[in-house]
Image (tube, helix red, strand yellow):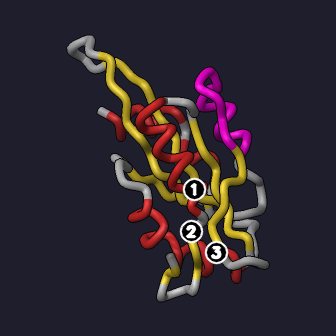
Amino acid sequence: MANSSSGMYVNDDCKLKFLELKAKRNYRFIVYKIDEQTQQVIVDKLGGPQETYEDFTNSLPEHECRYAVFDYDFTTDENCQKSKIFFFAWSPDGSKVRSKMLYASSKDKFKRQLDGIQAELQATDPSEMTLDIIKARAL
């Protein structure tokens, strides 16, 4: 489906892998990128169920924008096991301006394709998405 504001398409695989993360818990995280040649959002990396938050943050490129989802498991103060799916808009300071604009203009449309996102975080630097920040947003 085209994004009318940016002309961006979302590859069906993006939605299918997200459904597998949400329903089957086949993945801990999914990193998406915009393929500027084909003008579509595609799956860049899949993180298996045993991978950690550190594995996830290490999979984000230092100088390139990405979208990502992370399935965060946690225990509430009442000792209940819960899970929350976070959407990340990763736009590091060192990335190209054109890339930042493309990701920013396509984000809302893409995010709407992923039904089940429970929290969102935008980050330009790893310090803006530490595990402590995720924990605080999850509770």
Q: Is residue 22 above or below residue 91?
A: above
Image x and y of residue 122, in percent: 50, 58
Q: Residue at x 61, y 80 (%)?
A: 101
Which quadrant of the view contains residue 65?
bottom right
- Report the Cα–Cα distance between label 2 and label 1: 7 Å
Q: Amino acid at mark 2?
A: Val
Q: Earlier in the sequence, mark 2 or mark 3?
A: 2
Q: Residue at x 26, y 15 (%)?
A: 80
Q: Which residue is mark 3?
A: 100
Question: Can residue 92 be seen at all in this image of the molecule?
Answer: no
Q: Which residues are magenta?
A: 46-59
Q: Residue at x 66, y 61 (%)?
A: 42
In the image, which is nearer the foreground, mark 2 or mark 3?
Answer: 2
| Dot 2 and dot 1 residues touching (CB under 8 Å) | yes
Q: Amino acid at mark 3?
A: Lys
- Report the Cα–Cα distance between label 3 and label 1: 20 Å
Q: Residue at x 60, y 45 (%)?
A: 30
Q: Is residue 18 left or right of residue 85?
A: right
Q: Which residue is mark 1?
A: 14
Q: Which residue is at the far left?
A: 78
Q: Earlier in the sequence, mark 3 or mark 1?
A: 1
Residue 85 within the segment the image draws in magenta: no
Helix, strand or loop status at disc 3: helix
In the image, which is nearer the foreground, mark 3 or mark 1?
Answer: 1
Q: Which mark is residue 128?
A: none
Q: Is residue 22 left or right of residue 32?
A: left
Image x and y of residue 11, in percent: 60, 65
Closer-to-camera residue (23/93): 23
Q: Is residue 106 above or below residue 115?
A: below
Image x and y of residue 4, in percent: 47, 87
